[in-house]
Image (cartoon, rainbow, N blue to C red):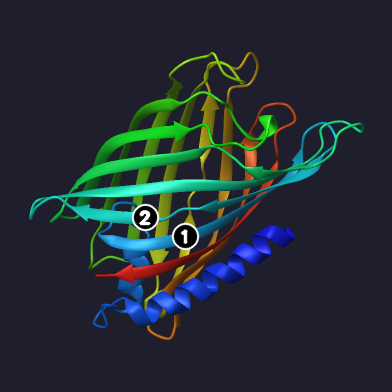
Amino acid sequence: MTRTNMCISRVAATAGLALASALPVHAAMSAEELAKLAQNPVGNLISVPFQNNTNFNVGPLDGTQNILNIQPVIPISVNSEWNIITRTIIPIISMPAFSPSTERVNGLGDIQFTAFLSPAQPGKWIWGAGAVAQLPTNTDDELGNKNWGLGPSFVVLHLDHGSPWVYGVLVNNIWSLSGSGQGGNYNNGLVQPFLNYNFPQGFYLTSAPIATVNWQADGEKWTVPIGGGVGKIFHLGKLPVNTQLSAYYNVVRPDDAANWQLRVQVQFMFPK
């Protein structure tokens, strides 16, 4: 992890402890229930995940890429029947050099904002549908695309409070709204299936590979990983914290794409 990412993690921990004393926590929820709530992408839960993805053997020089995604999730109650769940992904990227004459590039990537409309009182099957927007916020040409993007996003999952399993899938696709800026047109899709098995005391097994597709690529369009890891609910005082460690291998990937990914996540949770 870079020095910048370490500083951000320290700030996040300090902010989490401060918010723990200011926001109410649902004391009646068990660690297993909190874990299931964290595994629901459209759960009625304010949370701030910090997800660090380290990608190995990237580019012709087999460098290491690091992406720290800061992903605040904020639910908005429309009425007794509907919620809007907003999720913002803020990527802080460290990109390796792609030739001996260039240097590593560090900075902010393109922010993505998603808003899901989801039932406020769902049954065992839960869904959310909405739109995702890509903002050209990159601080360097190597870290993103200078054209705005927009597309649909959908999630469906099965969560039964009497079962240890939580599983589902999230999909989206983003088209560029123009091709006039740096990077040109793009048409990118994402499919993230997720499968979790929960044990008592907030420990769980998880698999949530993120498959991506560049529909405009000339060669291999898909990146398809397999893998998984473990997760555990902890508490900082009264504040629940969801932690994860997992690894994924890209069985299908374009030339010069990473072959392995190590994912570490810390999610500060503020249940209502």
Residue type, label 2:
Val
Q: In which quarter of the image is the N terminus?
A: bottom right
Cβ atoms under marks 1 and 2 closer than 8 Å: yes
Would residue 249 be seen by someone viewing this image from the given angle? yes
Left or right for 133, reference 69: left
Element under disc 2: strand
Q: How many marks?
A: 2
Residue under numbered circle 1: 49
Q: Residue at x 57, y 16 (%)?
A: 184
Camera-side residue of 58 and 94: 94
- For the residue carrying disc 2, how many other residues have a C-alpha within 10 Å: few (<14), some (14-19), or many (20+)? many
In the picture as drawn, the residue positioned furthest to the left comes out as: 80
Above or below, 249 against 13 in this view is above
* Comes first in the chain, label 1 or label 2: 1
Q: Could you say where residue 166 lies in the image, as x and y percent from the top left?
A: 34, 57
Q: Could you say where residue 158 lies in the image, as x and y percent from the top left?
A: 27, 52
Q: Could you say where residue 120 lies in the image, as x and y percent from the top left?
A: 15, 54
In the picture as drawn, the residue positioned furthest to the bottom comes out as: 237
Element under disc 1: strand
Q: Dividing the picture into quarters, in which one does residue 32 lie?
A: bottom left
Would residue 233 be seen by someone viewing this image from the given angle? no
Above or below, 73 against 9 in this view is above
Residue under numbered circle 2: 73
In the picture as drawn, the residue positioned furthest to the right comes out as: 100
Camera-side residue of 64 and 161: 64
Numbered tag placed on residue 77 in the rendering = none
Q: Residue at x 65, y 35 (%)?
A: 143
Camera-side residue of 106 and 167: 106
